[in-house]
Amino acid sequence: MKNAINVEGLGKKFYHFSKERPTTVLEMLVRGLPGLRPERVFWGLRGIDFQIAPGQIVGVIGENGAGKSTLLQLLGGVGRPDEGRVEVNGRIGGFLDLKAGLRPDLTGRENIYISGVISGLTRQEVDVRFDSIVDFAEIGEFIESPLRTYSTGMQMRLAFAVAAHTNPDILLIDEVLAVGDEAFRRKCFDRLEQFKKEGVTIVIVSHQVNQVRELCDEVLWLHNGHLVAHGDPEMVVGQYATEMSATKKRRLRSVVTDEGDADDPTFRVKKKAHRFGTKEMEITDVLLRTKTGDVVQSLPAGHPLTVEVVYQAPQPITDPIFNVVITRDRQVCCAVNTNGETEALALSGNGRFTLEFDRLDLVNGLYHVDVGIHAPDWSHAYDYHWHLYPLQITANDGSQKGVLRPPFRWRLDPAADSVRD
């Protein structure tokens, strides 16, 4: 199966001109052509490589100026790369900006038809879907009012509602997670999940990193036009949040190689980390134990498991959150934490905490136990260990599907006239 999107060696440059650049033909004649030359070249993106499989939701995160919108524009065919290539397999029915294409002096009704046609629908298809679009947008009687009388939230809801009723292969969305109130955002999430089930590939640029973590299958982190990390949302978003919380002036030390400076246009980040955090509080050991206390990496399905975490806190840390996540093939099977479960404490020195599962009812397969210690407001991790502790679950019945293997018994009550062999 072809990837929905292939990006290889992608680069896009921009030119910075002097403030004294001629702005009229007369100035150009007086000062000559040298005044038109750029002072320097700035690479908005460089050395970007990634692939996106059909039906995935992929988030793009990074601070302002990281190159997120430039990447989305190149994926959508707006502009051409100066280096590398972008291959898109499928019809792009999405939008680079939710409000792009909206006409403020036209009514909501008129904008629905214009946006629908721009997105690839026929007028007849918009006719059929019109009432559903209006209901989704929650515009009501304002549908006949000029768009300039709408609030920003109403405009965003209308634009998303139109896009939610198209038939794309690929959606490109800029800051959709900022649309409307929490109830409407949840409705947007549900529609995106439905698109995913239909096989639509979705690329989302957003600053709402916690929602990206919840919604996306993979995440791309851009920094100064370079790809810092690409992969599991928990890992990539955790790295990003930790780095941003430390200091915006700090160099990217925890996830980069020693090949150069992250601000150097020739720098390319390719290292995959499995541990990140500010290290204000550190995990020094993690042990997976059976009911009898034996340390294991394999466990029969339905047996008890204890996760024992040893920590060190050089300085007192008030009310840290301990977090344990069990995953399989990037799917979260179980996630528990101490937030609201234990009394507030100021921890310092060496210590340990344990999590006891009375029974682990999972199907046969290889899992990973991820362990982390977070700040009380979840803003960043003190220490997070990702995919460092494998756990093989063994079950006699290897034909079961899914993840959960609850206790069960089969019972057969044959009819009285049944014939037994």
Image: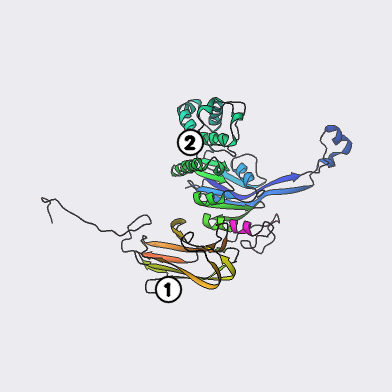
Would you place residue 336 above or below residue 417 in this image?
below
Image coords of residue 394 (percent x, y): 36, 65
Q: Which residue is mark 1?
A: 295
Which element is circle 2 on?
Answer: loop
Task: In the displayed orientation, state which residue is furthest to the left.
Answer: 417
Specify the label residue 34 is tagged with: none
Image coords of residue 411 (percent x, y): 21, 56
Specify the segment rendered in magenta: 241-270
Image coords of residue 256 (percent x, y): 63, 61
**Looking at numbered disc 1 in the image, what kind of residue is underneath it?**
Val
Q: Nearer the viewer, mark 2 or mark 1?
A: 1
Would you place residue 319 above or below residue 130 in this image?
below
Q: Earlier in the sequence, mark 2 or mark 1?
A: 2
Label 2 neighbour load within 10 Å: few <14, some 14-19, many 20+: some
Would you place residue 364 above or below residue 111 in this image?
below
| Residue 144 in which image quadrant | top right
Residue 195 in the figure: left or right of residue 299 = right
**Looking at numbered disc 2 in the image, what kind of residue is underneath it?**
Asn
Residue shown at the point (35%, 66%) measured from the top left: 303
Label 1 neighbour load within 10 Å: few <14, some 14-19, many 20+: some
Specify the label residue 167 is tagged with: 2
Q: Are marks 2 and 1 in contact (CB under 8 Å)?
A: no
Is residue 18 on the magenta stretch? no
| Residue 402 in which image quadrant | bottom left
Of residue 69 and residue 279, the one placed in the foreground of this image is 279
